[in-house]
Amino acid sequence: MNAVAAGHTYAIEERFDKALKLVRAALNASDLEIAGEMDMPATWPGESRKRPARCRVLLVDCPLLVFEGLALDRAAGVYFPLHVLLASDGVRTHVSTVKPSGVFDARLPAGAAEPLERLEARVARALESLVAGER
């Protein structure tokens, strides 16, 4: 992930499996849905550098915000769902959000900008509640 694509990064002082449960619960409590999950490999093909032992991407959305974005501009569908990356680091887990506008290096379609910003803000609030110890 390049620096432009990075949204926010949080450190949760829990091992990966527990942090994953906490993140899922925080997102659920914020009325957000996990539309899918993907495990990432420890290394990419042709790459010698080792990545974290565990790495997972959560595809997070809010159906109402997705609907709003699509109703205003069909191109908004390219930018949903929001990607949340969890990576193990021993007894700590790093959680990062990915800004779609940074990944695509493009300006968001007019219909997608506001719903996506609200989705990013809701995800950030959910993750900040974990870091602040509101478990």
Image (cartoon, rainbow, N blue to C red):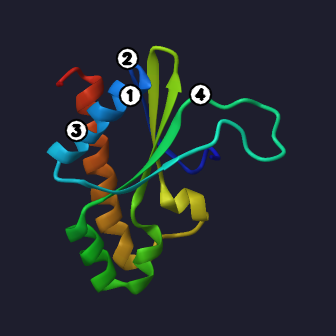
The quarter of the picture where residue 117 lies is bottom left
The amino acid at mark 2 is Glu
- Find out whether the residues at labels 3 and 4 contact each other: C-beta distance under 8 Å: no
The amino acid at mark 3 is Ala
- Give the spatial CA distance, label 3 vs label 2: 15 Å
Please name whichever residue, 133 or 58, is drawn nearer the observer in this view of the structure.
58
**Residue at coordinates 59% horizontally, 65% vertically from top-left?**
104
Percent of width and height locating residue 84: 43, 46
Location of residue 60 with respect to 93 vertically, above or below: below
- Find out whether the residues at labels 1 and 3 contact each other: C-beta distance under 8 Å: no
Sequence order check, earlier mark of 3 and 4: 3
The residue tagged with tag 4: helix, strand or loop? loop
Residue position marked by numbered label 1 in the rendering:
17
**Residue at coordinates 29% horizontally, 33% vertically from top-left?**
21
**Residue at coordinates 35% horizontally, 78% vertically from top-left?**
111
Q: Residues within 10 Å of mark 2 (few under 14, many from 20)?
A: some
Q: How many marks?
A: 4
**Label ID, residue 26:** 3
Of the residues tagged 2 and 4, which is closer to the observer? 4
Percent of width and height locating residue 133: 22, 20
Q: Is residue 50 left or right of residue 68?
A: right
Of the residues tagged 1 and 3, which is closer to the observer? 1
Residue position marked by numbered label 2 in the rendering:
13
**Label ID, residue 53:** 4
Percent of width and height locating residue 123: 30, 47
The residue tagged with tag 2: helix, strand or loop? loop
- Give the spatial CA distance, label 1 vs label 4: 12 Å
Q: Residues within 10 Å of mark 4 (few under 14, many from 20)?
A: some
Q: In which quadrant of the rendered image does the C terminus lie?
A: top left
Sequence order check, earlier mark of 1 and 3: 1
The residue tagged with tag 3: helix, strand or loop? helix
